[in-house]
Image: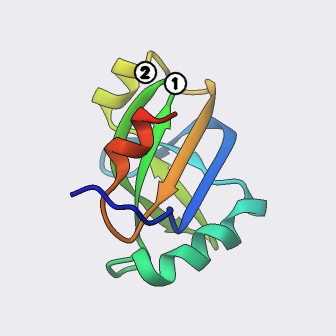
């Protein structure tokens, strides 16, 4: 359901795709430290627990919905295989990231208006 309210946070940055090895490899982009406070502020209304923050993101023109993961006082944006494949990005690539944190829907209208 579209929302007429503005996003709680809307940030754009350039980040490098990194790998974290757990039971399986996972790929992320770290939110720069100077933008963490804006995400943390929005998370007060948007987070659904465990510190994760639901977001809509665009990487290399590919739009997707996910959640930022808290890590060492910052946040990581996970990149699933399907997103990396569609966006044509790989480990070590520097990409422009556009993230919207919203309390309710509205992502499709936001993305179309870009």
Q: Dividing the picture into quarters, in which one does residue 96 lie?
A: top right
- Mark 1 surroundings: few (<14), some (14-19) or many (≥20) residues within 10 A: some
Q: Which mark is residue 60?
A: 1
- Mark 2 surroundings: few (<14), some (14-19) or many (≥20) residues within 10 A: some
Instruction: Residue at 54%, 74% (x, y): give it.
Output: 42
Is 2 displayed left or right of 31 in the figure? left
At numbered mark 1, what does the secondary structure look like: helix, strand or loop? loop
Image location (x, y in percent) of residue 9: 57, 63
Which residue has dot 2 on it? 87
Image location (x, y in percent) of residue 89: 49, 20
Asked if the residue under mark 2 is in contact with the one under mark 1, i.e. CB atoms within 8 Å, the reply is yes
Instruction: Residue at 44%, 15% (x, y): give it.
Output: 88
Instruction: Residue at 32%, 78% (x, y): give it.
Output: 48
Residue at the outermost right position: 34
Q: Which mark is residue 86?
A: none
Q: Nearer the viewer, residue 114 or 36?
A: 114
């Amino acid at each position: 359901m579209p929302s007429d309210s503005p996003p709680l946070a809307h940030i754009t940055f350039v980040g490098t795709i990194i790998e974290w090895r757990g039971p399986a490899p996972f790929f992320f982009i770290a939110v720069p430290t100077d933008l963490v406070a804006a995400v943390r502020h929005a998370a007060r209304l948007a987070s659904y627990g465990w510190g994760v923050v639901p977001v809509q993101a665009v990487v290399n023109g590919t739009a997707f919905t996910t959640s930022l993961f808290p890590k060492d006082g910052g946040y990581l944006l996970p990149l699933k295989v399907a997103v990396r494949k569609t966006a044509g990005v790989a480990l070590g690539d520097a990409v422009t990231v556009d993230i919207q944190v919203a309390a309710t829907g509205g992502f499709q209208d936001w993305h179309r208006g870009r």
